[in-house]
Image: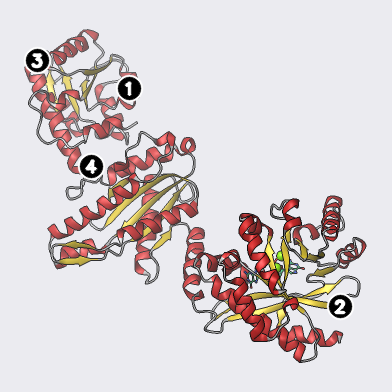
């Protein structure tokens, strides 16, 4: 849509000896007399101008201006329906057309008319009848000046990057075609304080050199992003802008989701942070980023750009934050993960992890026969943080191994202690995360903890999820067999929610099937769930497995489990997961 604006503002420098690039400019003329427009067109063609657009009806002029985006407009003042003054007013009020240079061609050259036209931003005048060489000269000057001016206002002198005005036009275009391209549009504001510091401590030239280096990194980053097909023609140059002396803008289009925007931002910040030598100075730029997303944060360039800027300023003022989303919701999510993540490191060593135990109960006798160990994090400010808020974060940050080992060790030691205290030989179950399961040393670690605690292997059960096992069937089988050789038991947790093929279920050395809470929730009222649960129980039994229902909250659900001959259950009806002292009290009560 804005191709001509871009064309106008390409580096222009010296004109070629053979043919001036100015001759490629599009000239539009609005005049109600066809004879006049024909004549001017002929003159201009003789002079080498090849793109000429005519409106003889002034009422069509605005539409045509939008469509053609000419580099210059030749305008008659005296026309029926709509005068040249009316048109000038409309052009100056139009965001897209406002800066079009206008040369007035008119017989009415009274001082008053001239003054009024000048006030409306007319660039130049030509009297009718038009002198051919005068016309060509005025046109050429106007175009040359306009190109120079456009270059000055549209491009940054140090980096050659587009400035805010062009960036805004790019944002408008990208937001307009968002429906077509799909995905997320994000406006990034990147602030690099070193640009200012270098100017103050060294020189403007040094600051410019740093800015040029950063601009190159940003352009490279953008040019390596996959370009959505519907935006293929767009130029990566227009995705990067210099917004002021310390701030850059980047426009991302067609990104799959917010998480991808976040990971791209991290990647970009990592690239910008690489040290660079400027003159005598070794600089490690500390860029911070603000991210605004369309349409959540707005859809106009001003709002998106401003929101991103505010977020970047905030991120830059916080010691441990390098980027921030503009919207409160997204921001709090990424902030929480960031803050929690850094605190999670060392939580085990600082003694902040807790194990709660939830009884696994025999359906027939209603007695506790085992327990599931469920981890919690006793956060100094947030209190007891549930595992769903930090397990996936721990996986992402590579911290799950340490947490998992702590859980394994603590659970084995507690269960061994209960036996020594005469509370019976309970089977303790622990949950294992995917990275921990596939790390390769789980069996060794389990063996070490069993020996260390004195717990018999058959009193330890390891809960694995279906989706984890199906992720890599060959590896899973190897890991499971290694664990089975130690004598420990295996359970499939949340059964029914993932995809598991029956043929695999047969070959896996599984001891227990744990029916997911979602199937138990609506029992006994929902017939389809009754049928599913019955099928899982029968299936488990036919494969020689013990079947346990999780999330049993009501007496009616328990009765349903009795009727369907489920072996065990777990759920709030009997007890929530509780700290070990409370669990021991439950055991003593049934002794
Ligand atoms: P899970 O292994 O399926 O654990 C069962 C979850 O259901 C527990 O939530 C438990 O509190 C909850 N629950 C039990 N009975 C009921 C009930 O009757 N009604 C309802 N509404 N909920 C019930 P929790 O403790 O928040 O644990 C959530 C998940 O976190 C666990 O799901 C497990 O996947 C993971 N997790 C917990 N501890 C560990 C751990 O030590 N290591 C790993 N890798 N993951 C863990
Ligand atoms: Mg579990
Ligand atoms: Mg479960």
Q: Is residue 2 above or below residue 199?
A: above
| Gap in angstroms between the C-alphas marked 2 and 3 | 106 Å
- Kindly identify the residue that appears in the image at 17 percent across and 56 percent down: 209
| Gap in angstroms between the C-alphas marked 4 and 3 | 32 Å
Per the image, the residue denoted by label 4 is: 154
Quick check: 443 left or right of 175?
right
Q: What element carries label 3?
A: helix
Q: Compare marks 4 and 1 and give the one earlier in the sequence.
A: 1
Q: Is mark 1 on a helix, strand or loop?
A: helix
Residue 366's x, y, as percent? 88, 75
Q: Is mark 2 on a helix, strand or loop?
A: loop
Q: Compare marks 4 and 3 and give the one earlier in the sequence.
A: 3
Q: Compare marks 2 and 4 and give the one earlier in the sequence.
A: 4
Q: Nearer the viewer, residue 57 or 162?
A: 162
Question: Residue 55 shows which numbered tag?
Answer: none
Question: Residue 64 shows which numbered tag?
Answer: 1
Per the image, the residue denoted by label 3 is: 132
The C terminus lies in quadrant: bottom right
Q: In this view of the protein, can residue 496 be seen by the observer?
A: no
Question: Residue 367 shows which numbered tag?
Answer: 2
| Gap in angstroms between the C-alphas marked 1 and 2 | 84 Å
Which of discs 4 and 1 lies nearer the camera? The answer is 4
Q: Compare marks 1 and 2 and give the one earlier in the sequence.
A: 1
């Amino acid at each position: 849509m804005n191709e001509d604006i871009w064309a106008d503002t390409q580096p222009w420098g010296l004109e070629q000896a053979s043919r001036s690039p100015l001759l490629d400019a599009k000239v539009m003329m609005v005049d109600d007399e066809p004879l006049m427009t024909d004549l001017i067109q002929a003159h201009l063609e003789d002079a080498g101008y090849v793109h000429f657009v005519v409106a003889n009806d002034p009422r069509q002029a605005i539409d045509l201006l939008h469509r053609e985006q000419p580099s210059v407009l030749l305008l008659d003042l005296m026309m029926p329906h709509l005068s040249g003054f009316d048109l000038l007013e409309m052009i100056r009020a139009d965001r897209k057309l406002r800066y079009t240079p206008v040369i007035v061609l008119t017989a009415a050259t009274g001082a008053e008319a001239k003054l009024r036209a000048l006030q409306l931003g007319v660039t130049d005048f030509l009297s009718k009848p038009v002198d051919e060489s005068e016309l060509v000269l005025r046109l050429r000057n106007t175009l040359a000046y306009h190109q120079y001016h456009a270059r000055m206002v549209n491009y940054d002198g140090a980096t050659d990057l587009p400035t805010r005005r062009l960036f805004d036009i790019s944002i408008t275009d990208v937001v307009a075609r968002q429906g077509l391209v799909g995905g997320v549009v994000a406006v990034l504001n990147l602030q690099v304080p070193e640009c200012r510091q270098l100017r103050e401590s060294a020189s403007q030239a040094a600051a410019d050199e740093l800015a040029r280096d950063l601009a190159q990194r940003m352009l490279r980053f953008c040019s390596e992003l996959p370009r959505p097909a519907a935006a293929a023609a767009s130029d990566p140059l227009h995705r990067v802008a210099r917004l002021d002396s310390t701030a850059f803008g980047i426009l991302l289009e067609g990104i799959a989701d917010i998480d991808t925007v976040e990971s791209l931002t991290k990647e970009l910040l990592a690239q910008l942070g690489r040290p660079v030598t400027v003159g005598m100075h070794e600089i490690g730029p500390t860029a911070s980023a603000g991210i605004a997303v369309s349409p959540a944060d707005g859809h106009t360039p001003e709002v998106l750009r401003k929101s991103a800027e505010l977020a970047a300023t905030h991120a830059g003022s916080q010691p441990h934050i390098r980027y921030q989303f503009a919207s409160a919701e997204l921001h709090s999510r990424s902030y929480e993960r960031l803050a929690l993540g850094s605190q999670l490191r060392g939580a085990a060593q600082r003694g902040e992890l807790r194990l709660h135990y939830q009884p696994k109960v025999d359906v027939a006798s209603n007695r506790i026969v085992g327990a599931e160990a469920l981890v919690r994090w006793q956060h100094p400010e947030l209190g007891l943080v549930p595992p769903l808020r930090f397990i996936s974060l721990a996986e992402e940050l590579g911290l799950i191994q340490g947490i998992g080992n702590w859980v394994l060790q603590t659970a084995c030691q507690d269960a061994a202690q209960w036996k020594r205290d005469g509370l019976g030989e309970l089977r303790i179950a622990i949950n294992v995360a995917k990275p921990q399961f596939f790390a390769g040393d789980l069996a060794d670690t389990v063996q070490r903890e069993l020996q260390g605690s004195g717990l018999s292997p058959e009193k330890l059960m390891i809960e694995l999820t279906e989706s984890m096992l199906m992720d890599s069937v060959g590896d899973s089988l190897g890991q499971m067999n290694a664990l089975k050789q130690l004598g420990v038991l295996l359970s499939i947790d949340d059964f029914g929610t993932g995809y598991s093929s029956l043929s695999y279920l047969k070959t896996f050395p599984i001891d227990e099937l744990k029916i997911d809470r979602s199937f138990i929730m609506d029992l006994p009222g929902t017939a389809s769930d009754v049928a599913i649960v019955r099928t899982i129980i029968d299936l488990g039994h036919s494969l020689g497995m013990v079947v346990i229902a999780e999330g049993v909250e009501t007496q009616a659900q328990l009765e349903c489990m009795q009727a369907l001959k489920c072996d065990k259950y777990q759920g709030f009806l009997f007890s929530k997961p509780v700290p070990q002292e409370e669990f021991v009290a439950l055991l003593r009560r049934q002794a």
